[in-house]
Each structure stands twice: as structure tokens, then as C-alpha cells.
């Protein structure tokens, strides 16, 4: 990306932010080609209400995919009662695919965990069933406790009505969820992603984009997946005008992470972005050679120790080691190779 980050930031156009009141003016409907993907790990307490909300919103069971990600509770069994498609990540990531990810992209089996990996597995299924390029894919977290109050689906649909055309992704803007740390990082000198900071909530997991765009994105295995998606869109289009966010009218409530988990999450996201600098400049993910990705994944697979707050919230920081996010291939290139 050659454009100056300040110039990129100024390219953001205010109509790409839709207020809650404005969103309510649009008549929205769910299309037969729409699909919802819900990554779920140990969400037995909330998965039933999440599916119930989606069906009440207008989705049929056939349109809902639950990707169970290393769950040890009854998430899968509860979801299956609703007649939705319930898939297990370790089944979708067959021995052949796992071997290819290891030998071609340097991703050891032990690192195939986290939200990004679950979304990748769901995309493999979307490719297998030959999802139409124009289909809208909706991602929804499984742990939102007040779905009925915030009702994200009509808002995401309103975004498609408001910006139908060159818009690439619709996300939500939630009260009190501004991701200040990430936005500040994006404003540092030499970081060419200032345009992403125009979004209130870059890390929002409630989003929708078309399959034609999703299938060609290189993702991340864990917490950095949302940033990887936005980076890809900005790199390919050189303007944040492809982003759109719709404002919620209430605070979205989900499971609260402790300070330790937040530290691990934010470190993983920032490290994913920072490691690209080591390629000799902020190299767009979609232009990297496969060998470059393999080399980066091998390097980031080493446990990197750092200080993080204790999970209890009390006492001195603990020194722990965690591997960084791996760069996943796009579905399109994996199928083509």
C-alpha cells in the first residue's frame, strides 16, 4: 500500500456510518441465499437462545451453520435439536487438509484452534456446497446475552440496503465498544491502516460480507481474524469506503474476559499485524508468496513469553508463553492449489 495513511483516513466518507434511527427506515428481508455462521466453543448456555433469535429473525434452520470448536460441553447436542447444520471443526479440517496446512503453509495441527480457525472451517463447508458468489454471509458470536434487545440482524441487513453496490462489509458500532487500543495503534507512523480506525468497533464479530470477497481472503487462526478481514479489504480497495457500520441503540452484552485474556487477545492481534513489517514493509497479505507465509508461520509458531496480568486479577503479572496467530490461506487458493 503506497498511499499515505493520512490521505487514506480522509477518504472515509461519513455516510458509511448509519445511525440506529436511519437504519430503522429501511425495509429489510432475508434472502434464500443468505447464510449465518456461528463459531461456538462451550456455549451450551447460550447457543439455544442464539439460534432461537436467528429463527425468529427469519432464518430457516438450513441457513444456519454452527461450527463447534473444541467444545467439551453439550453445545453440539443442544444446537442439533433446532435442525440447524452442526459441524465439528476437527471433522471439516480433515487429515488431508491439516497435512496441507502444515507442509504448504507451516501451520502445525496444534495451532488450528481459535475463532479464526473455526471461521476458516465454516468457509471450507461453504465452498463444498458451492455457495453462490453473491451470497451474503453473516457471522454472529454465540455468547451474546441480549440478542433480543440489540437485534443485530435487521441492522446488518439495513446496511446492505443503504450501501448496496461497492460496499464490501457491514459491521456494528456498539456503545462502549470502541476498541481504543487498536484504533490508537492504527494511527502510529508507518502503519498503513489508518482508514480502519474510522470504524468505531473494528473488532466487532457481528458482521456480514459476500462470499465472493470472503473466499479469497487470507485469514488468521485466532483473535486477529477480524483485523485480517479489514486489512484485506483495505489493501485490495485502497479506501475505507468499502467498510460500513450500523449503530446499535444499546450496549451489546457478552461473556466478559478477564485482564489476562484481554492481554493475550490484544497481543495476538497487534503481533499479527506487526510481524508483517518484518517482510520488508507492510506487505499486503494477498500479495505474499506461499513460502513467505510458511516462513512467517514457522517463526510465529514459537512460544513467545511475555508478562500478562494474573487471571484472578490479583497479584503480580505472570510470565507466560503463547504462540502467535498463524496466517491461513484463502479458501480460493487452497482449493486451487
Image: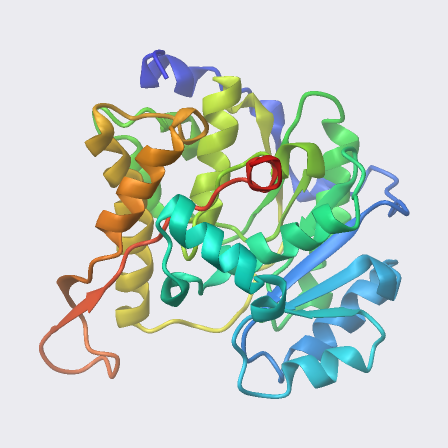
Residue at position x 61%, y 36% from top? Answer: 332
**Horizontal side, residue 82 vs residue 204: left or right:** right
Front position in the image: 284 or 330: 330
Q: In this view, does 139 lie to the left or right of 274?
A: right
Which quadrant, please, contains the N terminus? Answer: top left
Residue 216 placement (x, y as % from top left):
58, 34
Find residue 90 and report its horizontal and vertical position in percent.
56, 69
Residue reaching furthest to the bottom: 73
Quadrant for residue 82, please give it.
bottom right
The quadrant in which the C terminus is found is top right
Relative depth, front residue between 294 and 249: 294
Q: In this view, does 329 lie above or below 324?
A: above
Relative to 329, say whether 76 is above or below: below
Residue 66, quarter of picture: bottom right
Q: In this rendered view, identify the residue nearer to me: 78 or 195.
A: 78
At a point 70% along the width and 38% down the height, the residue shown is 211
Residue at point 31%, 34% (across, down):
292
Mark count: 0
Residue 304 image-quadrant placement? bottom left
Q: Can residue 198 be seen in this view?
A: no
On screen, residue 131 versus residue 3, left or right, reads: right
Please say whether residue 99 is visible from this viewpoint.
Answer: yes
Left or right, 290 with respect to 50, comes to: left
The answer to whether 179 is drawn above or below residue 196 in the figure is below
Q: Nearer the viewer, residue 277 or 15?
A: 277
The colour mode here is rainbow
Residue 157: where, in percent of width, then height?
77, 43
Amino acid at each position: 500500500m503506497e498511499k499515505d495513511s493520512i490521505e487514506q483516513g480522509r477518504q472515509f466518507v461519513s455516510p458509511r456510518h448509519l445511525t440506529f434511527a436511519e437504519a430503522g427506515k429501511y425495509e429489510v428481508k432475508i434472502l434464500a441465499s443468505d447464510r449465518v455462521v456461528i463459531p461456538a466453543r462451550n456455549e451450551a448456555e447460550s447457543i439455544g437462545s442464539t439460534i432461537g433469535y436467528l429463527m425468529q429473525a427469519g432464518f430457516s434452520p438450513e441457513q444456519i451453520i454452527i461450527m463447534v470448536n473444541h467444545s467439551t460441553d453439550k453445545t453440539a447436542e443442544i444446537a442439533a435439536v433446532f435442525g440447524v447444520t452442526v459441524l465439528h471443526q476437527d471433522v471439516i479440517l480433515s487429515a488431508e487438509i491439516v497435512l496441507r496446512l502444515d507442509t504448504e503453509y507451516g501451520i502445525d495441527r496444534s495451532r488450528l484452534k481459535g475463532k479464526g480457525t473455526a471461521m476458516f472451517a465454516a468457509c471450507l463447508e461453504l465452498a463444498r456446497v458451492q455457495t453462490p458468489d453473491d451470497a451474503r454471509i453473516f457471522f454472529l458470536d454465540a455468547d451474546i446475552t441480549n440478542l433480543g434487545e440489540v437485534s443485530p440482524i435487521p441492522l446488518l441487513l439495513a446496511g446492505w440496503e443503504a450501501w448496496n453496490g461497492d460496499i464490501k462489509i457491514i459491521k456494528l458500532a456498539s456503545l462502549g465498544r470502541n476498541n481504543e487500543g487498536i484504533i490508537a495503534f492504527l494511527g502510529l507512523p508507518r502503519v498503513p491502516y489508518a482508514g480502519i480506525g474510522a470504524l468505531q468497533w473494528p473488532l466487532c464479530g457481528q458482521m456480514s460480507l459476500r462470499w465472493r470477497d470472503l473466499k479469497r481472503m487470507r485469514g488468521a487462526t485466532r483473535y486477529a481474524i477480524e483485523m485480517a478481514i479489514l486489512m484485506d479489504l483495505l489493501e485490495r480497495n485502497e479506501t475505507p469506503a468499502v467498510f460500513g457500520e450500523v449503530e446499535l441503540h444499546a450496549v451489546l452484552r457478552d461473556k466478559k474476559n478477564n485482564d489476562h485474556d484481554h492481554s493475550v487477545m490484544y497481543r495476538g492481534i497487534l503481533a499479527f499485524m506487526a510481524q508483517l513489517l518484518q517482510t520488508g514493509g507492510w506487505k499486503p497479505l494477498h500479495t505474499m508468496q506461499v513460502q513467505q507465509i510458511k516462513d512467517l508461520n514457522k517463526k510465529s509458531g514459537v512460544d513467545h513469553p511475555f508478562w500478562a496480568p494474573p487471571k484472578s486479577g490479583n497479584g503480580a503479572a505472570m510470565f507466560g508463553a503463547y504462540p502467535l496467530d498463524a496466517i491461513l490461506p484463502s479458501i480460493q487458493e487452497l482449493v486451487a492449489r
